[in-house]
Image (cartoon, rainbow, N blue to C red):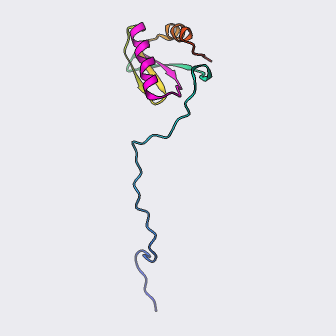
Amino acid sequence: MIFEMGANLQGDNFDTKKEDKKKKPKQNIEPKNKHQLVFTFEKRKGKPVTLLGRFYLVENEKKQILKLLKKKLACGGSIKDEWIELQGDVKTKVKEILENEGWKFK
């Protein structure tokens, strides 16, 4: 009679790799005229927030665009993944500014 209890530990194939959670997947980097930017509007805690998005750019270029928009619109903002978040309902003004810079919209 064979009595087995517990895990089967035969073999030497154990996966002990850790995943790097900070490492983000690579994005496709596209030029300005290939982007199709989209607006969304949300209210967070009663305050309006305009999301402008799907920027497939290098992080440094996203920061430059955010800096330009914050300066021209006199509002706060941040970058979350491929989206730029701006405080307030500024959709029409953002569209004017970025069209002058050569961006396309849906």
Q: Position of residue 36 (x, y in %)?
A: 60, 21
Residue 78 image-quadrant placement: top left
Between 24 and 40, the one nearer to me in the picture: 24
Q: Residue furthest bottom?
A: 1
Residue that appears at 50% across and 11% down: 94
Q: Is residue 57 above or below residue 69?
A: below
> Is residue 101 in the magenta section?
no
Between 85 and 18, the one nearer to me in the picture: 18
Residue that appears at 43% across and 19% down: 64
Q: Position of residue 7 (x, y in %)?
A: 42, 74
Residue that appears at 50% across and 7% down: 93
Between 97 and 5, the one nearer to me in the picture: 97
Is 27 left, or right, of 69 in this rendering?
Answer: right
Q: Is residue 8 above or below residue 19?
A: below
Q: Is residue 69 above or below residue 30?
A: above
Total numbered badges shown on the rendered structure: 0
Quarter occupied by the C terminus: top right
Between 31 and 17, the one nearer to me in the picture: 31
Q: Which residues are magenta?
A: 48-72
Residue 23 image-quadrant placement: top left
Q: Position of residue 86 (x, y in %)?
A: 42, 17
> Is residue 57 in the magenta section?
yes
